[in-house]
Every structure is written in structure tokens, then in C-alpha cells.
Image (spheres, coloured by chain):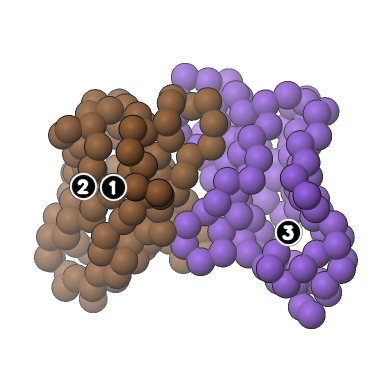
Chain colours: A purple, B brown
Amino acid sequence: EDKVVQSPLSLVVHEGDTVTLNCSYEVTNFRSLLWYKQEKKAPTFLFMLTSSGIEKKSGRLSSILDKKELFSILNITATQTGDSAIYLCAPRFQGAQKLVFGQGTRLTINP
Amino acid sequence: GAGVSQSPRYKVAKRGQDVALRCDPISGHVSLFWYQQALGQGPEFLTYFQNEAQLDKSGLPSDRFFAERPEGSVSTLKIQRTQQEDSAVYLCASSPRTGLEGYTFGSGTRLTVV
């Protein structure tokens, strides 16, 4: 059965800190992995990763995938209070359109 | 429209009542998905449409759940004889093509069954 584990489940840091969120997966016929940010209700798309070792970057956020070790990390540098949210990772496998979401990491940035 | 629109935003149903949740995807988006998100959990897949065809309904938890997209645009998720365990946020998402990029999610419908 497909399995996605995110860690930590919850993280509280001070504004300006750097955080690393982890996502490990066991998905048959892996195709890609997506990261989403969920603040209120609607998850918003951050990154899609398909190749190992190639970092994707958007401002203070970056993400990388390791297909051999079956994990991905999401880094946020110089955190701001607006980064407070739940971060979800979701692998997708070949031949299927659905995403398999992890439980999420609840990130809280204190001023 | 500019985004994925879901209605109602909130729904309180008495146990045993039938409910219908609506999703208006972004115009022209081929793929449409329904997910169920329980409190403190990640979204769980329910069903997937490509245009009007329901290609995957493997995540529907019981035969009380039914989804349709008759004209390939608006979709309705219907839950019959609601139970307390159906209480969750129901998220709809759409994407312009099949599986090549991230989906755009709506803000969801929070269903509370009392």
C-alpha cells in the first residue's frame, strides 16, 4: 500500500530561522512528488519534482527529491510569520492521476 | 472563473440526511478531483474525472458517495444518508491537462454531520 510520512508533524520556530521539512514515501511506480502549502482551506501549489538531485527554488523556498532514498525535503530560509501553514507533500505514481498526501507538517513562525 | 469555486462553504446536516456539494472548476480544465480531508489529516483521494468521464472512483468510501460531472465542467459530490464519520472538509481540484502539473484546489466545503 502507498505510504507517505512527513516529519516533523509540528514545528514552532522564530521568525528568521531556517526550517527543513521532510517527506518520505513508499509509492509503487513513482512518477512525481508535489508540495503544497495549506493556510486556511485551499492547498496552494508550491513545487513539482520529477528528477532526483535537481533543486527547485522559489524565493525563500526550495525543494529537492531523492528517488533512490525515496524522500524529499522542503527548505524555507529566513522564515516569516506568513509562512505559518500546514505543508503537505504528495507523491503521484505512474498510470494514476491521484495524489497520495502525507499528514502534513504544521509550521508555526513566532515573531 | 479565476479559481475553483465550491459551494456551500459550510454545511450542517442531520444524520441520515442527503447532501450535495458543488464544484465549479477553472474554465477549460479537463481534470477534476474530489478529496476528503478529516481534521488533522492530509487530503484523501475520492474520485477523478477527465471531462465527463469518471475514470477513478477507487477512493469513494462507500456506496453512499456518488459523484458526477455530466457536461465535463461543474461537478457534484452527493452523500446519501450522512453519518457522523462523513464530517470533513471536501476539497475539489482541477487541472488543465492530465497529470502534467499541480492542481488548483478550491477552498472546500466543511461538512458537519450532527
Give me the chain letter of mark 2.
B
Res B26 quadrant in image? top left
Q: Amino acid at mark 3?
A: Pro
A2 relative to A25 in the view: left or right? left
Q: Amino acid at mark 2?
A: Thr
Disc nearest the viewer among 3 and 1:
1
Q: CA distance from mark 1 to mark 2?
A: 9 Å
Give me the chain letter of mark 3.
A
Q: Amino acid at mark 1?
A: Asp
Give me the chain letter of mark 1.
B
**Which numbered marker is on residue B24?**
1
Q: CA distance from mark 3 to mark 2?
A: 36 Å
Choose between A11 and B99: the one closer to the eye: B99
Disc nearest the viewer among 1 and 2:
1
Q: Secondary structure at mark 2?
A: strand
B93 over A104 or under it: above or below: above
**Which numbered marker is on residue B76?**
2
Q: Position of residue A95 (x, y in %)?
A: 47, 19
